[in-house]
Amino acid sequence: MSNAAHPEVVTTHEVHHDEHHAHHHKETFITKYIFSQDHKTIGKQFLITGIIWAIIGGLFSVLFRLQLGFPGQTFPILETFFGKNAAGGLITPEFYYALITMHGTVLVFFVLTAGLSGTFANILIPLQIGARDMASPFLNMLSYWFFFIASIIMISSLFVQTGPASGGWTMYPPLSALHDAGEGSKIGTDLWLISMAMFIVSSLLGGLNYITTILNMRTKGLSMTRLPLPIWAMFFTAVLGVLSFPVLLSGAILLLFDRNLGTSFYLSDIVVNGQILPNEGGSAILFQHLFWFLGHPEVYIILLPAMGMVSEILSVNSRKPIFGYMAMLGSLFAIAILAFLVWAHHMFVTGLNPFLGSIFVLLTLLIAVPSAIKVFNWLTTLWRGNIRFTPAMLFAIGFVSLFISGGLTGIFLGNSTIDIHLHDTMFVVAHFHIVMGVASFFGMFAGVYHWFPKMYGRYLNKTLGYIHFWVTMIGAYLIFWPMHYQGLAGMPRRYLDKSIWTNFNVFQDLDAMITVVSIIVFAVQLLFVFNFFYSMFKGRKVTTPNPWGANTLEWTTPINPGHGNWEGEIPEVHRWPYDYGKDGREHIMQTEKPGANESEHH
Amino acid sequence: MQVFFIIAILALGFLIVFQIAKASEYVSVLRGEEKTRKQNNRVNAFLLLAFLILGLIGVYYCNERLEGKILAFGSADSDHGLLIDKMMKISLIITGIVFFITQVLLFWFSYKYQESDNRKAYFYPHNNKLELIWTVIPAITLTVLVTFGIVYWFKITGDAPEGARQVEVVGSQFKWEFRYPGKDKILGKKYYKKTTADNPLGQDWDDVNNHDDVYGTGEMHLVVNKPVELVIYAKDVIHDVGLAHFRMKMDAVPGMPTRMWFTPTKTSKQKAKELGNPEFTYEISCDQMCGAGHTRMRGTVIVETQEEFDLWMATQKPKYAELMEAKEKNEAKVDTTAAKTVAQLEIKK
């Protein structure tokens, strides 16, 4: 994987005539598919690793839902999967917490951060800005391999004797800091922390690369305000990640110190299992500040790329420009700024100073303004369009619907007064699964269906796509909508067994229904995975370079672009990417020069 | 065997769906791709509209089914809880309206503006006036919500009124312990390193305020219509005192005592009668995940009249008195045995 074997990366506009690009040199299997420095291959590596993780993380949720839906019943299949942790077909409480911890960590970080923004930032940035590759293809490759190492460590933690970390994906100390507080707080938590440290390195290497590439390597004529919206979204995502992930890293390292070196950053006044610990003066809440300083931007790290791609897909398939490009950009910017200023709304009931709390209420609810602008702009984009319902478009519409539903419940939780009651109840679970989990997944699916032809030169099967969309859409609402009611009854989240509670023990039918639906939805995701891998090799071939009639630069490359993306010169850009239906023309590519008597030019 | 069958059925189902999907692809090529594409488009547009209508019916149905199982807005059993209920109601009305309008527009536009040969998409890149309107309206609405929210928030989290009774709540894996001040109405000092089996809360016996403090576990006693301030500690990991019926909640953090106060407005008996459920009891749930026993970390609250409470208190022995008694007994034991030995020795002489 020497640099010499790698095509020259063009960094300035002056050398566009450079004829150096793919096919000129020999690539071995290893340099082409494994230690590849081609951004497209790296993107696919992120995607496929993400898919594998999504299956693992999703399967965990289905398995523990079995126990939640049918308490007391034994499921031999659980023992097959988990051995002594589910002896006799019943998950032990300790292992239940390990499962939800892994489910959360895997889906938030490994699937929706690496698998979503890692995939599409890699694939789309160079293609849509007209660059031959990332600013540093080598660091980009390292980014994937650090993610891979993080994955290996996390997977290995599933097989240690005391089980994986079980402190929840938020890993609050002292539960996560005291070896005696539970089985999962032993070696499993160390592995979790080390894996996350590797993951953060990966995400920083990726993020710095994305920012540099977007700022420096745009093709001629592509000013920042002519960038397609996915690129803007990836840009803000990368900025958020670069500024907030290091804070989590410091939090994780201090936790490792507390666990193994006897420091007291997070520990004070503790009597655990009758044993009096010497630590005094630490603050358990400090970790929460450090964690949520990443944790909240993280939500937008997950959501912004989905928003960007959805904006693009809605516009392309409505055959209409995105409404209010500058407002879309401004609201992305506002969300990115506010994302840093709202972390303590996760901590309203930790004993936080009430005055500080009130400031966070104000800032949190402010986010609803740019979010509302985005929703109204998406709606106006559909208005008087000529809409084509490709599977990608359906997922984009589904995204908007879920974003509305989940966003509005955020107005409840962001208001500290209501949060006192709803904090840590099933209402929270319902809220963030809809707005962050399922909505972002919809953005990701939309992206996969839309750009699959660019990735593999083939189409995904459409009928399977439609089945996938409809079952997932209906299923997502069936699973998460009624969950709000459990929260309104005060039912705390992360309860395995409600039988001893007189007031929370009233939702048995509902839990059973949710479990059955989640099994069906999971099965349909497997159908999608099958469609993905099958179509990669056997799908219908793409015969035209621009199958969706889109304007952006990736569709000016050959159907199967090599490393370097364009044969010959990199195209020059003359307009913004959203000239659909302008002056009676179906669409006008970004590369087309403005006509002599063209109306309003952007 | 059963598992094998299920897997076999699933695999078969997959195969069938896949074959249909594959076949539909060939059919579309045969029939003309453009024609099939347009048909698909119409079907999906219709389904989106159907989803909207059935979805709204579903929302209504779900509410009918589950409304009776939630804690109804306005049914809170504390003064603060009523404020929280009111805030929820305001938020629900506002978000409900927005939800309805935006979802209807989303699916209606999708249906109405589905691809048609007779329509050309309308080039409409921006409109500053519209954008200004839908920036300002949400901003004003949110100002209303923020104002209500913050006013209530300060009322709820402000200082407890003078004379509010204090009760100490201590969480540990996986139980709740309580301490009530005695006649002096002051909770004595404590230090975690003094914790022993006899002194579970680590009370400092040098502080005389501790001598009349009453210790209890599992069950918390409160007086109706009297403000109470909970002083909350945790021994090992973070817990959370969740009082759903009072709509109150506060973390218990090791090393950092937290506080919350409220006034219960109904006795447990009144509430049980009101609900027609003699089994009813107020519960304390641990709302912050605290380890394997999190699900079972249950406490109860008994709200009673002042007289009942005083009666109950009268039957409780302060931990200090208990310890002293035990000590005296021990000493007496030691004394008598000592006396016996002396006596025996004397007899031997």
Image (cartoon, grey):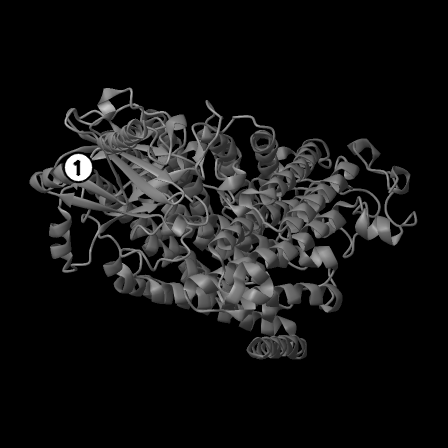
Residue at the far front: name it. Answer: B349
Q: Is residue B140 above or below residue B116?
A: above
Please name the residue that numbered disc 1 is placed on: B263
Give coordinates of residue A340: x percent, y percent. 49, 31
Q: Nearer the viewer, residue B153 or B225?
A: B225
Q: Nearer the viewer, residue B41 or A123?
A: A123
Q: Secondary structure at mark 1?
A: loop
The quadrant of the picture occupied by the N terminus of chain B is bottom right
Give coordinates of residue B282: x percent, y percent. 22, 49
A376 to the left or right of A247: left
Tell me which corner region of the image, top left, top right, bottom left or bottom right, holds residue A373.
top left
Residue sitting at 34 percent across and 60 percent down?
A: A499
What's under tag 1, amino acid-wise? Answer: Thr
Q: Is residue A156 above or below residue A537?
A: above
Q: Residues within 10 Å of mark 1 (few under 14, many from 20)?
A: many
Tell me which corner region of the image, top left, top right, bottom left or bottom right, holds residue B14.
bottom right
Residue sitting at 30 percent across and 28 percent down?
A: B338
